[in-house]
């Protein structure tokens, strides 16, 4: 079971990550796929600090409605602050498997890097089906964590750290499972689109800079043998940047589906 909780330091790191260039590109990709129109009703599952909810609200406008839920009180507080001037945004603490909304209430439902952490994933997908109108769209963005390539002179240490990080998610390669899971929830998969991330520099405007710090915090919190190597590993990434030999890539996947019945 995942031991990752987006509260306190981890929530702060997640919000810092959300503001880097790679995440701006990610938000544009998700919003382009949703093609939200003025007046539509949309639900975000796992809203984090409210970055997506804010942009979605600008798309649907004051005649529309954006509902955003998260299990973390820290994240909901941040999301409410970010969206405070947008009165058609409602952020509340709730679980993906028990959404506080009526049947067929939304034109679109989406979740970004969240469904892989839900213990009762089948129930969460059925809830998404329930609250979607017929013909409504579901978009799930998740990373195949085993797809990561992170250059290191110490390949064995890198392998151990990435293997330990995979334990942060219940479904570390969720995109590979989603087509079957969606059909089981009576949702029709439409397409899966890779949205690769490539970083050849290690700085605060890159995805891997903040991901490394999240991994570091996760390993320290678990107090596993890999935690003892985490600080040295971070120092190596800084050294690779100084030498001009830094390299990171991963392959997140955007999965789109519709409710057909």
Image: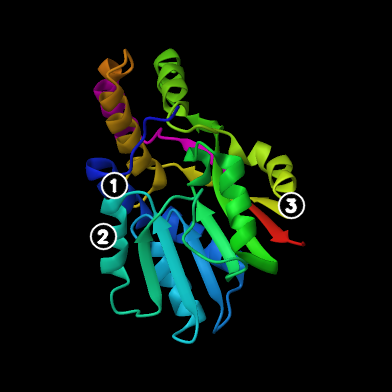
Q: Residues within 10 Å of mark 2 (few under 14, many from 20)?
A: some
- Mark 1 and mark 2: Cα distance apart in space: 11 Å
Please tell me how many numbered marks the rendered image carries: 3
- Mark 3 and mark 2: Cα distance apart in space: 33 Å
Viewer-nearest of discs 1 and 2: 2
Question: The N terminus appears in which quarter of the rendering?
Answer: top left
Say what secondary structure mark 3 lies in. Answer: loop
The mark nearer the N terminus, 3 or 2, is 2
**Residue for point 40% across, 79% down:** 88
Report x, y in % for residue 137.
65, 64
Q: Which residue is disc 3 drawn over?
A: 186
Say what secondary structure mark 1 lies in. Answer: helix
Quarter of the image for residue 54 reads: bottom left
Quarter of the image for residue 157 reads: top left
The mark nearer the N terminus, 1 or 3, is 1
Specify start and end residues of the magenta stretch as a single range.
230-254
Mark 1 touches mark 2? (CB < 8 Å): no
Report x, y in % for residue 214.
33, 37
Q: Is residue 158 above or below residue 84?
A: above
Q: Which residue is disc 2 drawn over?
A: 77
Quarter of the image for residue 7 reads: top left
| Front residue of this view, candidates 157 and 97 | 97
Q: Which residue is disc 1 drawn over?
A: 11
Q: Is residue 250 above or below residue 236?
A: below
Report x, y in % for residue 252.
56, 45
**Residue for point 43% across, 55% down:** 23
Q: Residues within 10 Å of mark 1 (few under 14, many from 20)?
A: many
């Amino acid at each position: 079971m995942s031991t990752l909780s987006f509260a306190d330091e981890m929530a702060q790191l997640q919000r810092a990550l959300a503001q880097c260039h790679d995440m701006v590109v990610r938000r544009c990709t998700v919003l382009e796929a949703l093609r939200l129109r003025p007046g539509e009703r949309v639900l975000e599952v796992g809203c984090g600090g409210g970055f997506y909810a804010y942009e979605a609200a600008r798309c649907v406008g004051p005649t529309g409605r954006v509902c955003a839920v998260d299990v973390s009180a820290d994240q909901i507080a941040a999301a409410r602050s970010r969206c405070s001037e947008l009165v058609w945004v409602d952020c509340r603490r709730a679980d993906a498997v028990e959404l506080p909304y009526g049947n067929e209430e939304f034109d679109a439902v989406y979740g970004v890097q969240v469904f892989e952490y839900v213990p009762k994933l089948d129930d969460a997908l059925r809830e998404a089906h329930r609250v979607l109108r017929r013909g409504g769209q579901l978009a799930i963005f998740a990373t195949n964590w085993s797809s990561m390539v992170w250059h290191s002179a110490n390949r064995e240490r890198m392998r151990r750290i990435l293997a330990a990080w995979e334990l942060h998610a219940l479904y570390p390669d969720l995109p590979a499972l989603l087509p079957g899971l969606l059909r089981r929830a009576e949702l029709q998969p439409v397409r899966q689109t890779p949205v690769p991330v490539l970083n050849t520099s290690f700085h605060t405007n890159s995805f891997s800079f903040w991901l490394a710090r999240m991994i570091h915090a996760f390993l320290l919190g678990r107090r596993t043998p890999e935690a003892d190597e985490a600080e040295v590993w971070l120092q190596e990434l800084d050294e690779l940047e100084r030498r001009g030999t830094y390299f990171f890539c991963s392959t997140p996947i955007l999965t789109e589906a519709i409710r057909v019945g």
